[in-house]
Image: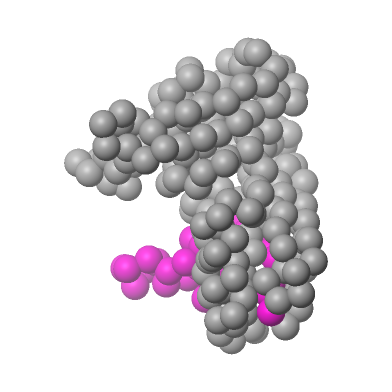
């Protein structure tokens, strides 16, 4: 637990745990249901992929849910991620603006589509380069499904351990997806004060 009050929780989700329950009974176990046992009434206002670890905010009542949803809609909530990608990403900073849509024949995958895709914007900054990989800090302006995975793949630098979009050798370069939500910043839905929570990206630097 990174933060807790009567209106919201900020938690550090582990990899290989769903954010919310899936439709199949086998997918009932998830972060939201685990939290609900101790904090009844929690809601989901955003989510992380099964394989992605890191910071999530979880509202505890309808008022907090409504206000946080408004902040997400207005892009007033700022998230950062760390990832380790294949190859030497150049230059040191940049942005990716490829529109995304569902890849219906290959669900739940997404794809780039300039005719029907929704706008998507990712900014990035190189942190370090080593062993023909690059550690990059990511600043998603939009929050499309699989946005970071696809954007990085499309510029030739898939995330290590990505089972959806990386070729086999890059998938097998890590036992897990090397993508971690390191911080989230937003305004408290009731009090209005700015909150920022951090989770160190240890998994990005751990040796397989």
In the image, is residue 39 above or below residue 185? below
Residue 26 drawn in magenta:
yes
In percent of the image, x 68 and y 33: which residue is there?
137
**Residue shown at the point (59%, 80%) measured from the top left:** 63
- The image quarter containing residue 69 is bottom right
- Picture coordinates of residue 200, whole percent (x, y): 77, 46
- Residue 84 appears in the figure: no
Stretch of the chain drawn in magenta:
7-35
Horizontal and vertical percent position of residue 186: 70, 58
Most distant residue in the bottom direction: 40
Q: Quadrant of residue 98?
A: top left
Residue at (56%, 48%) from the top-left corner?
52
Res 74 seen here: yes
State the image coordinates of residue 139 (x, y, percent, origin top left). Answer: 63, 38
Q: Quadrant of residue 177?
A: top right
* Residue 55 x, y percent position in the rendering: 67, 56
**In the image, is residue 136 part of the stretch drawn in magenta?**
no
Quadrant of the rendering where the C terminus is positioned: top right
Above-or-below relation of 180 to 127: below
Name the residue at 32% across, 68% down. Answer: 23
Residue 127 vertical position relative to residue 30 in the rendered view, above or below:
above
- Quick one: 204 or 110, which is closer to the camera? 110
Q: How is the image coloured?
A: one colour
Compared with residue 192, is residue 154 higher up or lower down, i.e. above or below? Answer: above
């Amino acid at each position: 637990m990174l933060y807790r009050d009567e209106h919201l929780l900020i938690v550090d989700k582990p990899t290989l745990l769903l954010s919310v329950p899936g439709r199949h009974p086998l997918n009932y176990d998830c972060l939201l249901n685990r939290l609900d046992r101790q904090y009844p009434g929690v809601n989901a206002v955003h989510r992380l992929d099964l394989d992605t670890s890191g910071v999530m905010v979880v509202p505890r009542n309808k008022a907090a849910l409504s206000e946080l949803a408004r902040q997400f809609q207005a892009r007033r909530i700022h998230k950062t991620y760390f990832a380790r990608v294949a190859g030497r990403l150049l230059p040191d900073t940049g942005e990716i603006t490829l529109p995304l849509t569902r890849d219906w024949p290959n669900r739940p995958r997404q794809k780039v589509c300039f005719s029907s895709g929704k706008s998507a914007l990712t900014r990035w900054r190189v942190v370090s380069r080593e062993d023909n990989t690059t550690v990059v800090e990511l600043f998603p302006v939009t929050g499309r499904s699989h946005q970071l995975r696809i954007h990085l793949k499309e510029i030739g630098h898939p995330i290590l351990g990505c089972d959806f979009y990386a070729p086999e050798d890059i998938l097998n370069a890590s036992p897990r997806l090397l993508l971690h939500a390191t911080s989230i910043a937003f305004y408290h839905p009731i009090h209005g004060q700015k909150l920022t929570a951090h989770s160190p990206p240890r998994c990005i630097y751990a040796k397989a």
